[in-house]
Image: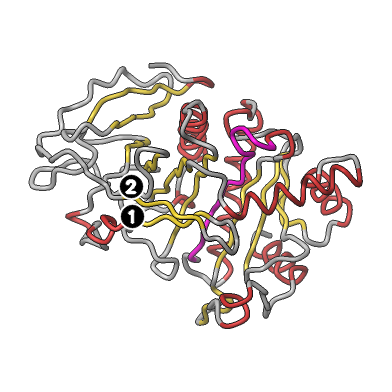
Amino acid sequence: MQTPRGARRTDTQLSDGRDLFYYDPADAPARVPLEDTRGLPEPKPQVDLRTDPLTGDVITYATHRNTRTYLPPADQCPLCATKPGNPTEIPDHDYNVAVFANRFPSFAGPGRTEVVCFTSDHDKSFTDLSQGQARLVVEAWADRTAELSARPDVEYVFAFENRGREIGVTLNHPHGQIYAYPFVPPRMRTLMARAREHQEVAGSNLFADVLAAERKEGTRVVAENGTWTAFVPEAARWPVEVHLYPHRQVADIAELTTEERDDFAELYLDVLSRFDGLYGDRLPYIAAWHAAPVRADRELGYLHLELLSIRRAADKIKYLAGSESGMGAFISDTRPEDVAETLRKVGS
């Protein structure tokens, strides 16, 4: 199956019926997927959604996830390509980018969760990818976003990556996830409410105005190219926090042009290299795509990526203590302007 913008997608299924999609460059030979020989039983996830009457937030209970794989040794990694003695979630002996339905999903029935493997190389990080490989990941994100957004049980599609044990990853292989929520998550409800208020008062898009102000002011801009700008937000919550915005308002990754996808891959790799250069090792981070909701308030959304790290010094972690966890009021030890200047110098 040929996906938009030149990637080749090959569809297959795992032995328990879950979907698996391979993404290869458009000029790669046609892939004939190998059979998953593990004979896995059909998944029976137990998911319960409840609404907090005090906040309106939806809380998800997925008790089956307590048994998911936790930090296995490299030779038993379930995200590596299959090798003799280690049949994995990827039956083929090699792959470029692979996406499959999560064996331990946070949502099932309404909603869906998928795993995105960025490369078959267990020892790499996204930072180590070539621009072409990073670009292929963007294609996978875009393709999955479009397909998941078309589902009637999905209200929000969230692509993200957690990197580092400090963040809480359970598998070290370079990968991310996509959550197709059956509801609009709390943070996006808050952002859309603010965007609606701003539209009514100012008559313009909140996110576009934030981007314009940051580019004009300049002191918090970390890097930019023809179609994207990366900056530390004026009111950053986290010790290291950078937002990447396209210069054009689009609702989600699937709406990005070929040029915008190319430029994102270039800028993102640049920013990630600055993160890793900050303290001389791989910085733990969360990379969170903020797209518009699938239906409600879609015209108010503005696709951007928020990249954050909890490390506040080379040997210190920012913990969410009383004020942050109890009241949601962040207190930071780092000034956004200082962080931006440091990141600019790291890349110079």
Which region shows up in magenta?
284-297
Q: Secondary structure at mark 1?
A: strand
For residue 343, which numbered disc appears in the image? none
Percent position (x, y) of residue 155? 54, 37
Query: As shown in the figure, which amino acid type bears the numbered disc 2?
Result: Pro
Indicate which label's residue lies in the foreground, 2 or 1: 1
User: Above or below — where is 175 with respect to 27?
Assistant: below
Q: Is residue 289 left or right of residue 98?
A: right
The chosen color scheme is secondary structure
- Rendered-image quadrant of the C terminus: bottom right
The residue tagged 2 is 105
Q: Could you tell me which residue is drawn at 21 percent across and 42 percent down? A: 43
Percent position (x, y) of residue 145? 51, 33
Answer whether labels 2 and 1 touch (C-beta < 8 Å): yes
Percent position (x, y) of residue 50? 45, 55
Q: Is residue 212 left or right of residue 288?
A: right
For residue 62, which numbered disc appears in the image? 1
264 or 15: nearer the eye?
15
Percent position (x, y) of residue 208? 80, 43
Q: Residue furthest front?
A: 53
Q: Secondary structure at mark 2?
A: loop
Q: CA distance from mark 2 to mark 1?
A: 8 Å
89 or 282: nearer the eye?
89
